[in-house]
Amino acid sequence: MASSRNSPSIDAIERALTACLENYAPPGARLAVALSGGIDSVVLLHSLARLRPEGLSALHVHHGLSQHADAWADFCAAFARSLGVPFQCVRVTVERGSPDGLEAAARRARHAVFARIPADWIVLAHQRDDQAETLLFNLLRGAGLAGAAAMRQASGRLLRPLLTVGRAEIAAYAKAQGLEWIEDESNADIRHTRNFLRHRVLKLLLGRFPAATRNLAAAAARFAEAEALLDDLARLDLAGCEGFPLPVERLQALPEPRARNVLRYLLAHNQVAIPSDARLREALRQMLAAASDRHPLVELGNHRLLRRRGWIHLEPGGPSSDSR
């Protein structure tokens, strides 16, 4: 294996990892790297094995969606073994007929596995180019500020230490270290929206704006800061209120944008998927404008928002019942 301690790519990756670990994962923290076998996760595990081998493990989620899935699992096991890193492979069944697509179904299955892993952090290999793609993807879907913030470095137990590192630097690291990795053939299929953005849209943008991915990722970080400030404002506007049920008069006393911000914050805090801006505005309108003897109800995915006796409640979804 090549030795290149002074390689700029190695320095960049080690700086990113060190800064992230210092902020979120002190010595002794258990880190489980999600190892797909692709170049990003291979570089992530390899670099962490050099920097923080204590408490480090590797996890491979076997989706069974490719004819090569077994070979990928074997590759990941062998690679982790070569680094002396404990390895676990978990097989999942992905809902192929999911209404929101195969990618989303695979992601749900993967994250269900992450939730069961006994570690302090599940470490993911998303990098700067992935962040730029996610920002574009979310904006094109009409997402608000939360979507524009794209992926957070730390979210729940998920840690993404490579968000400041570009794809070119990762490739240079892999080459300098003589690493091997696998290529998922589905990554070239531009029928998938993210692949289309990567291979067509961003490629075109980079031809005209060479710093496009760097600048888009930086913009996502600024959007995340703005969202954090709006969360602070929501907490100030909620002072003295725990959350749902929420007195209608609390929202009625606020300007509409701030009332909408409070509602968005509370929904996110309760793990409710944030609806479109138009849907959120309509939900707020119904909650605030209804006469005192009315009981408006708004379905929000697997939850429902309803007003009852001057209070706004959030309840699990399902058939509506008489709430009077």
Image: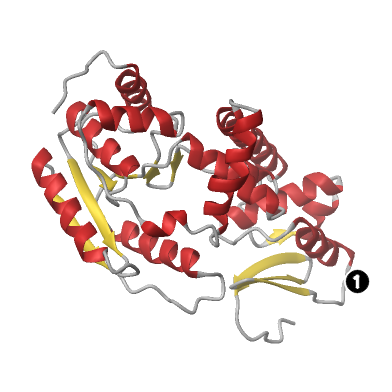
Residue 33 occupies quadrant? top left
Looking at the picture, tell me which residue is in the foreground, 237 or 121: 121
Question: Residue shown at 86%/45% (left/top)?
Answer: 255
Count of residue discs: 1
Seen at 61% across and 31% down, the residue is 207
Residue 83 at x, y = what percent?
12, 39
Q: Is residue 54 above or below residue 93?
A: above
Would you say residue 241 is visible in this rendering? no
Relative vertical location of residue 147 with respect to residue 295 in this rendering, above or below = above
Element at label 1: loop
Q: Is residue 298 left or right of residue 130?
A: right
Residue 62 percent location from the top left of the image: 27, 64
Give amino acid for label 1. Answer: Ala
Q: Residue furthest top?
A: 6
Q: Is residue 295 left or right of residue 17?
A: right
Quadrant where the C terminus sits is: bottom right
Residue 59: give x, y in percent of width and height: 24, 53
Left or right: where does residue 37 sit relative to residue 186? left
Q: How is the image coloured?
A: secondary structure
* x and y, in percent, of residue 224 in the image: 60, 36
Q: Is residue 4 above or below residue 65?
A: above
Q: Quadrant of the N terminus?
A: top left
Tag 1 residue: 291
